[in-house]
Image (cartoon, rainbow, N blue to C red):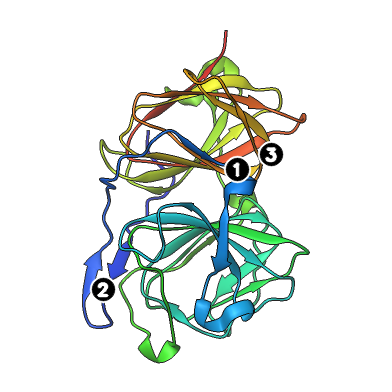
Amino acid sequence: MKTFFTLVIGFAVSVNAIAQTPTTDNTKSKNEVVTTDKIEWGWLNPLRGDKSPAAGKLWGDRTETLASGFLVKFNKGFSSPPHIHNVTYRGVVIKGLLHNDDENAEEQWLPAGSFWQQPAGEAHITAASGEENLAYIEIQEGPYLVKPTVNAFDNGERPVNVDASNLVWINAKDMTWVSNESNVESTFLWGNHQDGQLRATLVKLPAGFEGAIKNLSPNFRAVIIQGTIAHQVSDAKNSAILVAGTYFGAAENSTHKITVKNDQEALVYIRTNGEFEVTLIE
């Protein structure tokens, strides 16, 4: 199945040297869960202290060289000074309204469920307008650094801002990896859907869904964007309640039981190196 758009992601190792961001992730994921009480919080930009948004670790370590995923929490009315990053990042809005663009651009407030990409080296600002503002941020290589605009450079890629209302959803009957009766929907966000290549998908699970996700890839990471689910690895005794902003990883060939709670559909961001299957529990 083809994506409705494909992004080729670059990574700048310095202001004068440009290299491509890896299209695979050789770090094998494992069965793990990060609930709200297990999130480790700090400052996104420690040099600015409490003037910086807060950052919460979900997987990986943004201060190291490998890929990582983390939460960023913005106060209402926050607006950053113009700046650049040394790496390209991708973001999904979980709560509130976020704007990420050139400092002279007209405000485009992205609501929950929206997606954006910020290229390495490009000057921009980030602002927040909601009462609560939370986003999931992901990088392909670290460390994640903030630099002044005097260091700006063009790594060849361009920013992307996709409002949630502009996402194109595919129904279960049009996907071979989803049970037809599940009423699950999906939209492809980025990546190359070839064997072993990184890609990201938003999966919409309907209210009342009781099923399972089987990971067929060496690397599978999922973040709850909307709703509440009960999560349990098939061979484990205990389950966990996962709300928006929490995470679970999956080992290759593991099966994870998923039940959507509270009569509200759930939206899950899934980043993987390969295929996975969504089925109903019979």
What residue does disc 2 label?
13
Q: For this view, does 113 lie left or right of residue 254?
A: right
- Point out residue 212 in the picture as x, y percentages from the top left corner: 52, 21
- Of badges 2 and 1, the one in the foreground is 1
Residue 161 in sight here = yes
N-terminal label among 1 and 3: 1
N-terminal label among 2 and 1: 2
Disc 1 and disc 3: Cα gap in Å? 14 Å
SS assignment at label 2 = loop
- Point out residue 80 in the picture as x, y percentages from the top left corner: 59, 80
Disc 2 and disc 1: Cα gap in Å? 33 Å
**Mark 2 neighbour class, 10 Å CA radius: few under 14, some 14 to 19, many 20 or more:** some
The single residue placed furthest to the top in the displayed view is 282
What residue does disc 3 label?
227
Quarter holding the C terminus is top right
SS assignment at label 1 = loop
SS assignment at label 3 = loop
Q: Which amino acid, by three-letter code, is at mark 2?
A: Val
**Mark 3 neighbour class, 10 Å CA radius: few under 14, some 14 to 19, many 20 or more:** many
**Mark 1 neighbour class, 10 Å CA radius: few under 14, some 14 to 19, many 20 or more:** some
Q: Which amino acid, by three-letter code, is at mark 3?
A: Gly
Res. 96 image quadrant: bottom right
x 23%, y 73%: residue: 18
What residue does disc 1 label?
35
Q: Which amino acid, by three-letter code, is at mark 1?
A: Thr
Between 88 and 72, the one nearer to me in the picture: 72
